Amino acid sequence: MKTLKQNMLASLAKGMAVGALLFGAVQISHAGSADPSEGGAFTWDLVSSGSGQRGLSLITFSNDNTFRGYQMLAAVPPSTAGTNVSSNPRGGGATIGRGGSGSGRSIQDLLFGFSPISGVWTIDSKGKIVVFFSVALNVTSLVTNFLAATNDFTLVNSEQLNETTNVQQVFTNGQGSAVVSIFWPDPAPGFTQNYTLANTNFTTQVGSAESTNVVSFTGTAVFGKRLTLVCNTTFGKVTFNGVPAVPAVDISGNWIGVKRENGLAQNEFFSLTSFQLGNPFPADFPDIADFPNVYFTTDGLGAGYNFTGVAIVSRQKKVGFTFMNDDGTLRSMIGTLKPNKKGTTAKTVGIEEPINEVNFTATLQ
């Protein structure tokens, strides 16, 4: 079985490579923009969206021009039938990077999971906050392998449907299709028609690879009120909107959830505990207790499986869950959080490996 880090962090961060020397030519100035650290260290609660990278983050900016924090990403896979799945890198995802949404998007835009992040920041001569870091991604891919085969086809004359001919096509390894041209003498004076023949002998399997998501931010802050960052990443443009991170709704306690995936609804039970009361994953998240509104579960139970995971609640009426089943399957969902008389309810949507859309509704008892 994979470790927690290999699963929950696989899509987002196993390592960082921050090139601080690239800031050597930047002129430092605080004109026109508030310092996001306000001369010390300040933590922001951020909600992000764009390019399929829906996310929740908690980031602390420090006056030594470094930042650190934690980020959860979730995505909704493309719903368009016939989406081409290949072995490109994911989120996160044609592969998925473990987390995006909407028909017409490529699967490689998907990033999902939970991870620590860290990097460097400064303020440029125009008063803009400048931030960058890079993240190594573990990538899960659906890979189609076409095998050598000899297939028989019956081709029909599009003008005279009672006329047919048989052809035999020999495919080599890796060849997915072939084009065959047939001359039909009838009707006079005859015509040539092209047919695309598909190799029906193939296997589909889950593969793995590694990719790097390069992230660069620019933005502004109004200290104590809001932080706006526009982020360019390897997977597209993302906007982060932040407010000061203060204690939000307490979501600790026992939860009952319903996971809906591929037309099947499954009940789940789990409890959430604040990381500020204990940390069962110190090797993976050593400083997570420094951040508010982050919770863990180690007792998740479904029909025939167990799971562990992390939850984040945002002051911006959002909540996210990243769960890892005991077989190593990862899922991540983000949505709305609504306290009410019958109990706090979370309605979220996201993705489960390899590329399944999952809806998850849960109520705090």
Image: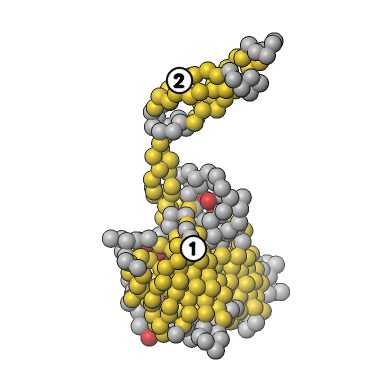
SS type, badge 1? strand
- Which residue is drawn at the image coordinates 48% and 76% (left, top)? 362
Q: Which residue is mark 1?
A: 358
The residue singled out by tag 2 in the image is: 168
How many C-alpha atoms fall within 10 Å of the one at disc 1: few (<14), some, or many (≥20)?
many
Residue 42 position, x and y percent, is 54, 80
Q: Nearer the viewer, residue 69 or 353?
A: 353
What percent of the width, then of the height, locates residue 35? Answer: 62, 77
Which is nearer the eye, 216 or 313?
A: 313
> Identity of the amino acid at label 1?
Val
User: Seen from this angle, which residue lies furthest left?
Assistant: 1
Could you say which is closer to the camera, residue 81 or residue 335? 81
With respect to residue 8, does 250 lie above or below?
below
Disc on the earlier residue, 1 or 2: 2
Quadrant including the N terminus: bottom left
Quadrant (top left, top right, bottom left, bottom right) of the C terminus: bottom left
Query: Is 353 or 22 nearer to us in this picture?
Result: 353
Residue 105: image location, x then y, percent: 59, 51
- Image quadrant of residue 13? bottom left
Q: Residue at x 53, y 17 (%)?
A: 165
Q: Residues within 10 Å of mark 2 (few under 14, many from 20)?
A: few
- The residue shown at (65%, 13%) is 186
Circle 1 or circle 2, nearest the eye? 2
Secondary structure category for the residue under label 2: strand
> How much space separates mark 1 and mark 2, taking CA atoms?
43 Å
> What is the three-letter code of the residue carrying label 2?
Gln
